[in-house]
Image (tube, helix red, strand yellow):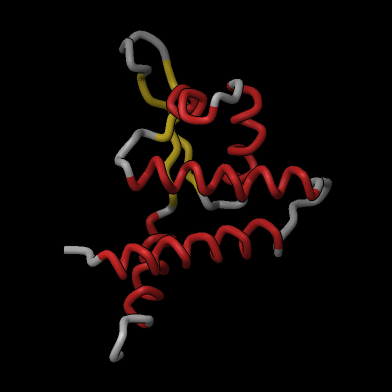
Amino acid sequence: MTSALNVHWQSQLFAAYALQEVLDKPIDGETPQSRLKQVGMMTVLYMMHQNHEQLTLSNICKNTGLTRNAVAESVDPLVERGILTETIVKNSMGRGTARQFEFRPEIFDRLRLGAEQRKPGT
């Protein structure tokens, strides 16, 4: 079972990871505003992930109040950076397709290791 302290450390490490990956490694032609949007989007996506919500464009729009285009503008660079993976799945109606995103599993392995290293007494 995950302790509250461990969850706290993982959240702190995720925030540091997001800042490092996006702000320290700009993509050619990207603006500072775009990078800040990506950091904010990573925070929203992390919270959705923690709540076991599917990371689809529709769900992200619902959680943020942003349009699909605005969400895509922040999410697409995260896919390009390799932070998120994208798959095409059936939509909730089962008739069309939807873009679904996931964090790369290595990110959470890295966070888990970092949180374990910060446990008191270790």
Q: Seen from this angle, which residue lies furthest bottom?
A: 121
Q: Report which quarter residue 6 is drawn in.
A: bottom left
Please identify the quadrant where the N terminus is shown.
bottom left
Q: Seen from this angle, which residue lies furthest left?
A: 1
Residue at the image position 81 percent from the left and 46 percent from the top: 31
Residue toward you, 46 or 121? 121
Please identify the quadrant where the C terminus is shown.
bottom left
Above or below — where is 95 with respect to 89?
A: above
Residue at the image position 32 percent from the left and 77 percent from the top: 116
Above or below — where is 122 with respect to 111?
A: below
The number of callouts visible is: 0
- Tell me if 42 is positioned left or right of 122 in this view: right
Residue 98 pos. (x, y %): 44, 22
Q: Report which quarter residue 73 is drawn in.
A: top right
Residue 67 pos. (x, y %): 60, 21
Above or below — where is 18 with respect to 45?
A: below
Residue 120 pos. (x, y %): 31, 85
- Tell me if 22 is positioned left or right of 10 in this view: right
Residue at the image position 63 percent from the left and 38 percent from the top: 74
Residue at the image position 54 percent from the left and 47 percent from the top: 42
